Image (spheres, rainbow, N blue to C red):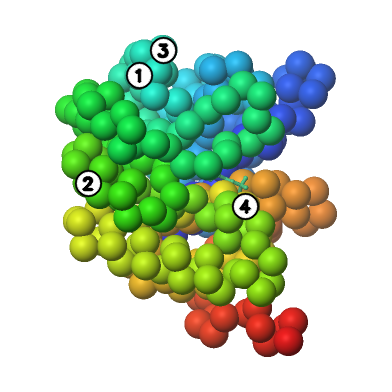
Amino acid sequence: MASLGVNIDHIANVRQARRTVEPDPVSYALLAELGGADGITVHLREDRRHIQDRDVELLRATVRTRLNLEMAATAEMEAIALRLRPDMVTLVPERREEVTTEGGLDVRGQLPAFTALTRSLQQAGIGVSLFVDADPDQLEACRQSGARWVELHTGRYAEASWAEQPQELARLEKGTALAREFGLRVNAGHGLTYQNVEPIAAIPGMEELNIGHTIVARALAVGLEQAVRQMKALVQNPRREPLFGQRHP
Ligand code: PXP
């Protein structure tokens, strides 16, 4: 059964729209945990557009589940992670001009750098996850890097048309199986919603889904605790049959 990591970056986005003190993502993390979040995820971006350093520091002291820090593979971020010791670091690609994370890491192309950073973080007792597309060559590189986890990028699945979604799902299923054959543990995320999450949650061997935008969006209507509760129910008990073709013949 997959668990649920709740990404609270978008709470910080609302705060940063006015550069004020509310809403505070730190207090919303507590509500997410009350709703059943198995972990809290934040992305500390180089440009600090949403989550701030102080958020990560306070979350480290207050999160009772697990803190997953998404970050770029830079010396600045490595130093912050080594100081704050999140339970997990998920390494992601980052470009200043993007609206949100686009595409997975090129671990194959920069294997020595990812191997060194993974070793440094793991030696400090921090779990390391690499955010990659479900591509056999990238998964093989992840194995070589020594990382214990991968997070499979579900963006293409989420953006696919109804006709294309089954093939994107199959790619993620195959990627999960291959990663597990390599001895990697598997998470997934990006673009998942209340409508499309169930087939991903039902993939055998899938351990954790990291979900943010759709939960924060629903929280505007029902509150964060309830929004997390509703997502957790889908993640824990997904319908097994694909949803696509049946609803949209
Ligand atoms: N996983 C990773 C690696 C991400 O970069 C993001 C977006 O910050 C997410 C999961 C969550 O994506 P979404 O907000 O679309 O649920």
Residue at mark 3? 76
How many marks on residues? 4
Mark 3 → mark 1, Cα distance in angstroms: 6 Å
Mark 4 / mark 2, whichever is N-terminal: 2
In the image, residue 216 above or below residue 162: above
Residue at mark 2? 143
Q: Are marks 3 and 1 in contact (CB under 8 Å)?
A: yes
Determine if the C-beta at disc 4 is less than 8 A from ligand 1: yes
Give the residue type that dot 1 points to. Glu
Give the residue type that dot 4 points to. Gly
Q: Residues within 10 Å of mark 2 (few under 14, many from 20)?
A: many
Judge from the rendering whether residue 151 lies leftward or rightward of residue 139; answer left or right: right
Q: Residue at x 69, y 52 (%)?
A: 214
Does residue 38 show up? no
Ligand 1's quadrant is: top right
Mark 3 → mark 2, Cα distance in angstroms: 25 Å
In the image, residue 22 above or below residue 207: above
Q: Secondary structure at mark 4?
A: loop
Mark 3 / mark 4, whichever is N-terminal: 3
